[in-house]
Structures are given as structure tokens and as C-alpha cells.
């Protein structure tokens, strides 16, 4: 590539940096010369302007455009609520919504439950640090990387060939017949969910383990003096004491699940009745050239996420107030 090709791009990049530096410098000068009376409010307002501008450009305007786009067809003509009618009436989209509901219900419960059990079992154990590292390790892997790893785990080879997938090899060792696990609904959906649980269990374990260690020792000691059983200790002491952390973990994982895309795209591309909202949004907008339907799915996903975000913010504020 010669200078003619990358020269204008370099010039535009330098110009953008220069404008940014100039705006920041101007803000600093204005704030420094601002009147002392009401200085804090004036300073806060000036420094918020760039953030509000970027928020409008990066979030508000795209949200408005997406909303408008959801009422149009592939040709850009206004079609009213046709895209939303399609979303809730066509078999393909209904399967997508059904899968998303299954993901949203099972994944947070399983990941949080596994993380909580593991945090309790290894609490104050000699190998606690190593055990936590092993469980948390999948969090360091991208969703695409995890999808590729588990796709090999579920791999199938027919014609009497030796299996390279661990799951099918285990089936063969126990006398069963290998099968194409990712092709059979609804089993394939649950196998994809297992990947997400594998990733998120480490996050749940770390947060809940820290919450368990934060339980006052006098409460635990009083319960032991009263002679409570380990099961009663779990339900009557541990769970109520970490309720706030449990809610945060559940809502955080739920938000991640609602927008899951990479795992499904990598492992099945949404085929064989495994698609979810985020994947179907991409498929409709870019593969089928139906941006209106993709926008409708995106808006529906946005509406589902908002209540969870607001609830999580409310819980965090309540926790801060009680400290």
C-alpha cells in the first residue's frame, strides 16, 4: 500500500487527535479561569460535556436509529410492526426466543449454584488458592476460544474411525455408539449452555467466596454453639448473609447470557435449532440482508436487558447504603 492509500487515513487520524487535544486543553483553560463562586459545579458541567457528547453519539443516536430501522423492511420502506409480528409468529424466531429463555433460566442458576458449592467446599482448605485458580481459569479464555475447545470435546468421527472428541470417546468406552451431539435438538442447546456454565462458574465462585469470607465470625460461632447442622448453617446463615452477592452474580451472568453470541456462532452458527437472540440478530441483518428484522431483535434484546441492569444498580446502591 503506497502513500496515496494510507496518507488520507493518517491525516484524518492525526486531525482527530489534534481536535481532541485542543478540546481538552480548551476545557482546562476555561475551568482554570472559571469564577471561584460555584466553581465546582461549573467545573463538573464542563468536564461532563465530552462524556455526554460521546454517550449521545455512541449510544443514544444508534438506539434511535435502530428503533426506526426496526419498522422498515430490507428495501428501507416503512412496514409498521411487521418485523415484530414476524418475531413472535414465525417458527424460526419462536425457537430462537425459546432457546434464549432456556439459556437465561438455566445458565445463571447452574453457574451460580456450582460456584457457590465449590466456594463452600474449598473454603479454608490447604489447596484453596490452587483450586480457585483452576476453576477461574476458563474466565481468561475468550468465548470464541471456549467454543472451539468444546467443539473438539463434542467432535464426532463416523465410519468406524477413532474418536477425537472426548465425549464420544467416553460413550464408546462405555459400549455406546458415537453420535453427532451438536446436530440433535434440544440436546445441542444444553451442550452449548454447558460451555457458558463452565466459563461463568469461576466468576461466581470468586465473588461468592469473598462474600462467604466476609460473614462475621461471631455469627458463625453463635450458630455452631447452638448446634446447627451443616445444612442448616448453609440455609440459615450462609445464604442470608451473602444474599446481596448472590443477586449481583445472578443478574450479571443473566445479562451476559442474554447477549451471548460467540459460543453459538463458533460451535453451530445457530443451525440445528440452537440460535439465540444475539446470533439471530446478526444472521438476519448480515446474512439474510434483513436489517429491519435484525434491528427488531436488537431492540427486543435491549428491552430485556434494561430491567436487569436497573435492578442490579438498585441492589448495589442498597448494599452501599447498609455499609
Image: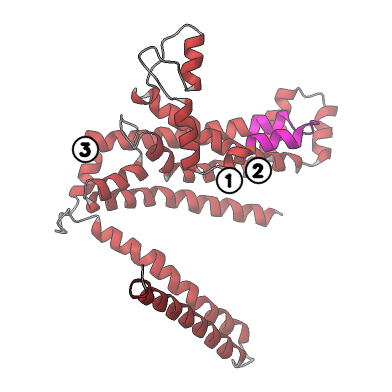
Position of residue 38 measured from the top left corner of the image (x, y, whole percent): 61, 87
| Residue 2 falls inside the magenta stretch | no
Assign a secondary structure to mark 2. helix
Residue located 25% across and 35% down the image: 92
Q: Residue 248 shows which numbered tag?
A: 1
Task: Give the left or right position of residue 321, taking residue 51 as reference.
Answer: right
In which image quadrant can residue 258 be found? top left
Whether residue 123 is in magenta: the answer is: yes
Tell me which numbered mark, 3 or 1, is placed earlier along the sequence.
3
Q: Is residue 165 left or right of residue 280?
A: right
Q: Is residue 5 something one can see in this rendering?
A: yes
Q: Residues within 10 Å of mark 2 (few under 14, many from 20)?
A: some
Q: Nearer the viewer, mark 2 or mark 1?
A: 2
The residue closer to the viewer here, 167 or 104, is 167
CB under 8 Å between callouts 3 and 1? no
Q: Which residues are magenta?
A: 116-135
Location of mark 2 (residue): 207
- The answer for how far apart the CA atoms under marks 3 and 1 are is 34 Å
Amino acid at each position: 500500500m503506497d502513500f496515496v492509500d494510507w496518507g488520507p487515513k493518517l491525516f484524518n487520524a492525526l486531525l482527530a487527535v489534534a481536535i481532541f487535544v485542543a478540546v481538552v486543553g480548551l476545557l482546562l483553560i476555561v475551568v482554570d479561569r472559571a469564577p471561584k463562586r460555584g466553581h465546582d459545579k461549573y467545573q463538573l458541567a464542563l468536564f461532563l460535556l465530552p462524556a455526554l457528547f460521546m454517550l449521545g453519539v455512541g449510544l443514544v443516536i444508534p438506539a434511535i436509529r435502530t428503533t426506526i430501522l426496526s419498522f422498515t423492511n430490507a428495501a428501507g420502506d416503512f412496514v409498521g410492526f411487521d418485523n415484530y409480528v414476524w418475531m413472535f409468529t414465525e417458527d424460526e424466531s419462536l425457537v430462537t426466543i425459546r432457546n434464549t429463555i432456556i439459556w437465561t433460566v438455566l445458565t445463571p442458576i447452574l453457574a451460580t449454584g456450582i460456584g457457590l458449592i465449590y466456594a463452600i467446599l474449598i473454603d479454608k482448605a490447604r489447596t484453596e488458592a490452587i483450586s480457585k485458580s483452576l476453576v477461574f481459569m476458563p474466565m481468561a479464555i475468550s468465548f470464541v476460544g471456549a467454543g472451539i475447545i468444546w467443539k473438539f470435546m463434542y467432535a464426532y468421527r463416523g465410519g468406524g474411525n477413532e474418536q477425537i472428541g472426548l465425549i464420544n470417546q467416553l460413550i464408546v468406552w462405555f459400549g455406546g455408539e458415537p453420535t453427532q451431539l451438536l446436530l440433535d435438538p434440544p440436546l445441542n442447546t444444553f451442550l452449548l449452555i454447558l460451555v457458558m456454565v463452565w466459563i461463568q462458574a469461576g466468576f461466581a465462585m470468586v465473588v461468592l467466596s469473598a462474600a462467604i469470607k466476609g460473614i462475621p465470625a461471631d455469627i458463625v460461632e453463635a450458630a455452631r454453639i447452638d448446634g446447627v447442622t451443616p445444612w442448616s448453617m448453609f440455609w440459615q446463615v450462609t445464604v442470608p448473609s451473602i444474599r446481596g452477592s448472590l443477586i449481583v452474580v445472578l443478574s450479571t451472568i443473566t445479562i451476559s447470557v442474554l447477549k451471548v453470541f460467540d459460543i453459538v456462532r463458533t460451535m453451530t452458527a445457530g443451525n440445528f435449532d440452537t440460535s439465540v437472540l444475539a446470533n439471530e440478530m446478526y444472521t438476519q441483518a448480515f446474512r439474510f440482508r434483513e436489517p429491519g428484522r435484525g434491528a427488531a431483535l436488537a431492540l427486543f434484546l435491549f428491552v430485556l436487558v434494561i430491567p436487569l441492569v436497573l435492578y442490579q444498580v438498585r441492589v448495589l446502591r442498597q448494599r452501599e447504603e447498609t455499609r
